[in-house]
Image (cartoon, rainbow, N blue to C red):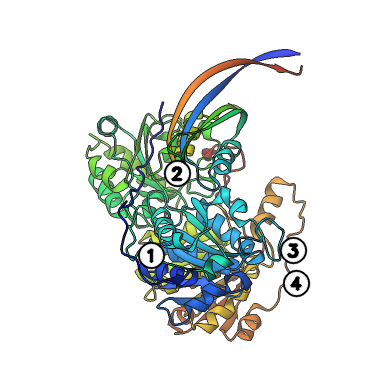
Amino acid sequence: MTAAAMTTERLVVEYLAEEGALVRMLGVVERRGFILRRTVMAELPCGRRATLALTVEPRGPGRSVETLARQLGRLHGVGRVHQETTSFIRDKAA
Amino acid sequence: MTAAIAPRPAFADAPAPAVAPKTGARMVVEALEREGVRHIFGYPGGAIMPVYDALVGSRLRHILVRHEQGAALAADAYGRVTGEPGVCLATSGPGATNLVTGIANAFLDSVPMVAITGQVGTPLMGTDAFQEVDIFGITLPIVKHSYVVRDPAEIPHIFAEAFALARSGRPGPVLIDLPKDVTVQAATVASNVETPLFELPAPDGDAIARANALIAAARTPILYFGGGVPIARAEGALRAFARRTRIPSVSTLKGLGSLPTDAEGFLGMMGMHGSRAANTAIDECDLLICVGARFDDRATGKIDTFAPRARIIHVDGDPAEIGKLKQADVGIAGDLNKVLDRLDAVPADIAAWRARCADYAKRWAPPYDAPGTGIYAPAMLKALSEAAGDELIVTCDVGQHQMWVAQHCRFSRPQAHLTSAGLGTMGYGVPAGIGALLADPTATVVTVSGDGSIMMNIQELATIRRYRLPLKILLLDNSQLGMVRQWQELFFNENFSEIDLSDNPDFAEVARAFGIEAFTIDYRAEVPGAIERLLRTDGPILCHARIDPRENVWPLVPPNKSNIEMMEKQP
C-alpha cells in the first residue's frame, strides 16, 4: 500500500427542500467528476430551507471545486454555496 | 468562497382574490395562454388526455407531429428563432421518453423550452403502473429545472416560474410532469399570478477595467464568440464592439451569423472543421477575447495548446463557465450586452495584425473549383445561401453536410443557422425546419440533410404536408454515413464498418408518397436550376442531390491534436 495525499473540499449548500432537490445536487457532484465522501443534512427552523454539507474529492486533475460550487449555485432553489478546504491521507493500492 | 447566485424571485405574500374552481388541465391551458404561447408541438396519449381535452377551443395552436422526438426538436428550433420557450407536450411513459433527445438537445445548446409530460395518477406513481416512467428522474441531468405537480392549485405558479426560468439567464429546458389526477381535479386559485424575475449579476466593474486595459495594450488580439451571443440577443452589441475595435474575429459553430459572414476581419469558424485562417490567428494572438463561448473541445482542439501566447478575457452569461476549462486572466459574468457596451477600450495599433489576418483569409480561402461534373456540395450550399438572401434560415442535420453548411453558407444573423451543436442530434433538421417556419413564417427555411440523418425523423414529412409548411429540403445523398466513413478512412486504416447506406430508398419517391414535390439531380450543371426551383416553389419541396461518396470535409483537426495541426485535402 502507498499513501497519497488527497485534497477534499467541503461545500455547504443552502437550499430549498423541494421535491428532487437532494438528488439534483448529488447528481451534479457525481456528473461533474467528484467523489462524494460525506454528506450531512440539516433542516433549518423555518421548514423548507435546509443545508447540505458535502465533502467531495475530485476524480482527477482538472476538476475545480470552485467550478463545482458555481454549478451547484446555478441550480434553481439553491441559495448559497460556501467552500472550505481540508486534506486527508487516502490509502491507495500499490 | 461563496459562489455567485442569481437572486431568487419574491412572490406576493398577501392572498389574492379567488375565482371559481377550474380543473388542472384548464389551468394548464390558461397558464400557457398567459405566457403568450402560440404554438405547441405534441402528440396525445392516455395520461395527458385531460390537457388535450382542455386544448379544444383555446387560443393555442397545437401542431400534431408523428413522433414525440419531432415535437421536442421542433420546439427547440422555435425557441431559438423566437427567443421564447418552445413548448412540447407528450403523454407519460414512451411519450415522455421520446422527448428526451430533444430535451437534451435544448440543454446542450442552452435553448429555452418548456416540456410538458403526462404522468400516471399520483396514487399509482411508484407502482410500475402502465406507461409509468420516472421522467422527472430520467431528465434530471438534462434540464435546467423540473417539477412534478402534486396539487392543481400549484399550476399557475409553477408554469409562471418554469417559463421565467427557461428564458432567463442561460436559457434551457424546464420539464413539468403532470399526474393525471392533478389535471382532472378542480381547484380554486388566485386570479393574479406573479411573474418571477431572474436577473444576471451586474458585471464586476474592476474586471471590466482590467479587461479594457488588456484590450488597449494588445498587439495581436482576436475576438472569439459563440452561442452565448445569440442566446443573449447580443449580436448588436457584438457588432458594435467589432466595428469599434476592428479586432479580427472567429466564431464557434453556434456563434455563426452573430457577425455577418462577410464582415470586415471575420476569419470564419474555428476548431475541428474551422478555417486555417481562424485557427492560425488564434495560435498567434496575444489576447483572446472570448464572448459567449465555453472552450468546447470541438472548438479548441487540444486545450493545453490552444491560444498558447494569449492572455484571456472570458465574458459569459453563466458564471459557472468561467474558468471551467481554460483559466481566464479576466473573467466577467453578466449580460453580454451590458458587458460589451462597457468594453470601450481600443487597441493602439493593430493595422499590421489586421493585414496579416486578411492575408491569411485570402490565402486559405476554400476552393470551389472541384474537378469533374458531379455536384460539389460546398459550392452548391454557398450558391444556395447567397441566392436565398437575408431571409434565409438553414436547419441542419448532423454529419458532413452540417460542417459544409457551417463552412460555406452565408449568414447575416445568428437565427439563420439552426444546428445541433452540443448534442449532435441526427434527425434535427426536418423537425427544426417545422419549428423555424412556424416561428418565422416570413423566412425562407431550408433544411440541409444527409441520407443518414433524414431517416431519423422522416415521418415528419407528414407534418409538413399536414400544415402545408413551405419547407425546402436539400438532401445531400452520398449513400453512406459520410462523417463516420471519413473518420474510418483517416483514423481507422480504412477499415470501413457499417457505413454503407446504398440500399437507401428512392428519396424523391418517398417525399412524393408523403405528398411533397420532389426531384433528383446528379450533375453540377443541374445545380443552378435546382436552386431556383427550390426557392421559387411555394409549397414544400425536396431536392435529392446525389454526391460523390468519397468527398470529405476539409480542413480537419485530428483527435487530440492542436488546432494548428489541421489536415488539408491532398491535391
**Residue B473 in sight:** no
Q: Are marks 1 and 2 on the same chain?
A: no
Q: Nearer the viewer, residue B554 or B128?
A: B128
Viewer-side residue, B115 vs A58: B115
For marks 2 and 3, give the one nearer the viewer. 2
For the N terminus of chain B, the quadrant is top left
Q: Nearer the viewer, residue B499 or B230?
A: B230
Which residue is tagged 1? Answer: B82
**Residue B4 pos. (x, y %):** 38, 35
**How far, Cα to Cα, is label 4 from label 1?**
39 Å
The amino acid at mark 3 is Asp
Kindly identify which residue carries mark 3.
B500
The answer to whether mark 4 and mark 1 are in CB contact below 8 A is no
Q: Between marks 2 and 3, how big is the CA–CA gap?
A: 49 Å
Which three-letter amino acid code belongs to the residue tagged 2? Gly
Q: Nearer the viewer, residue B224 or B228?
A: B228
Q: Which mark, by number, is residue B503?
A: 4
Q: Amino acid at mark 4?
A: Asp
